[in-house]
Image: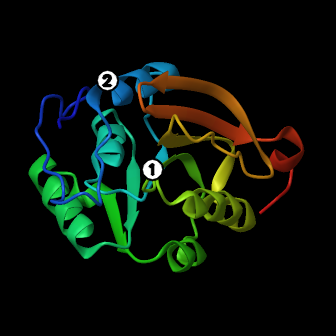
Amino acid sequence: MRIISGNRRGLKLIAPKGLDTRPTEDRVKESVFNILGQNFFDVTVLDLFCGSGANGIEFLSRGAEQAYFVDKSKEAIDCVKKNLDKAKLTGQAIVIENHLNQAMKNLDTEFDYIYMDPPFERRDLYKKAFKLIREHRILKPNGKLIVEYNTDKPLLIGEGFVEIKNKKYGNTSISICGWDENESNICR
């Protein structure tokens, strides 16, 4: 697993041991960033269910101003901190070890991009994350929500969101979502 572009290109990252974390494949990550574009300057990113932190670090390598990393696993959070230190990006990162509900309640930032990659088998977490993002209004009106999920189990897009683009990569699919136009006009 490595950073594929930007000022940290080629840097190898570590992943938490065990089967609880499934790092995003390089080909999937590369495709996602090709879809999103190449300019991430002055953006704030949330890497939700961050695992190793590779997706948030990829955004930082490509110019993002700040990235938040959220995971409930102490092992994952320790791994994120090591990867941020290795990449010399700790000053641009906020790392939060907490459960989804509590983490979302405490976030007081609106994000340009949210990368959401819960464990594939935990379909309840997808539904809960969509609901909490909507309730707490943490995605900017023109922001993008990138959701990684198992191709075999269709993603149920949460209320208030629309799918902009969908791509399949074997057993992994990516859905890029935004606010439904009626939702984006609601103030925080």
Question: Which of 124 and 135 lies nearest the eye of the viewer?
Answer: 124
Is 178 above or below relative to 134? above
Estimate the x, y position of residue 74 in percent, counting from the top left. Answer: 25, 75
Q: Is residue 120 left or right of residue 106?
A: left
Q: Quadrant of residue 142?
A: top right
Provide the residue designation for mark 2. Answer: 27
What residue is drawn where x is 35% and y is 47%?
A: 56
Estimate the x, y position of residue 20 in percent, counting from the top left. Answer: 29, 60
Tell me the kind of residue under disc 1: Asp
Q: Count neighbours of disc 1 (C-alpha within 10 A) and say few if under 14, some if 14 to 19, many if 20 or more.
A: many
What residue is drawn where x is 53% and y is 23%?
A: 167
Q: Is residue 37 left or right of residue 2?
A: right
Is 82 above or below relative to 142? below
Tell me the kind of residue under disc 2: Arg
Provide the residue designation for mark 1. Answer: 117
Callout 1: SS: loop
Q: Quadrant of residue 54?
A: top left
Q: Is residue 179 left or right of residue 90?
A: right
Q: Earlier in the sequence, mark 1 or mark 2?
A: 2
Looking at the image, what colour scheme do you see?
Answer: rainbow
Estimate the x, y position of residue 92 in percent, counting from the top left. Answer: 31, 55
Callout 2: SS: helix
